[in-house]
Image (tube, helix red, strand yellow):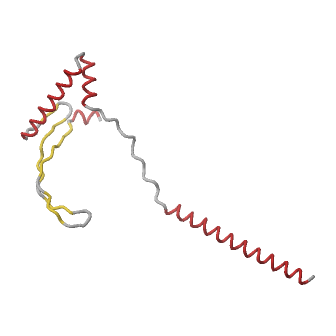
Amino acid sequence: MVVKKTAAVAKAGKAVKSAKAAVKAESATVAKTAVKAATAKSPAPRAAAPQATVTLKQIGVQLAESHELPKRQVDALLDDMIAAVTKHIKKGSKVRLSGLGILQVKKRAARTGRNPATGEAIKIKASKKVAFRVARDLKAVL
């Protein structure tokens, strides 16, 4: 009878040890998961909903409907306006669009930059760019 109890106690002891080991392993897994969750980067904030883009053609359709003109005629006027603005900007003139702003050419001086991949210094040529300065009226509306 003593031998049977000792064997039963030994089996029970082994069962307890294996249960403790299982609990340790499981708690370690849970702990690792918790650490990963705590240290994981939060997802980047979502950008605002994309804005609708209005094309020159859509503006032409609206103008044609509101002024009761043929769409082809309005498209031709808008194309001519773009061509005239482009011609004046190429010459270096400022183009003032009342209520919108001013388009003008700005000169950028030559400068030294850095190649982001290697960090090597590089020379950047002088260039021209088109700058747009918003009119006060439009700023006030926004």
- Across and down, in percent, residue 127 comes to 12, 51
Q: Is residue 81 left or right of residue 67?
A: left
Above or below: residue 32 compared with residue 63: below
Q: Residue furthest bottom?
A: 3
- Across and down, in percent, residue 25 comes to 64, 70
Q: Classify the position of the N terminus by image quarter.
A: bottom right
Residue at 28% over, 28% down: 58
Above or below: residue 76 compared with residue 94: above
- Across and down, in percent, residue 11 comes to 81, 77
Residue at 28% over, 23% down: 62
Residue at 52% over, 62% down: 38
- Across and down, in percent, residue 60 comes to 24, 25
Rendering quarter of residue 29? bottom right
Q: Classify the position of the C terminus by image quarter.
A: top left
Q: Residue furthest left?
A: 91
Q: Is residue 17 left or right of residue 97?
A: right
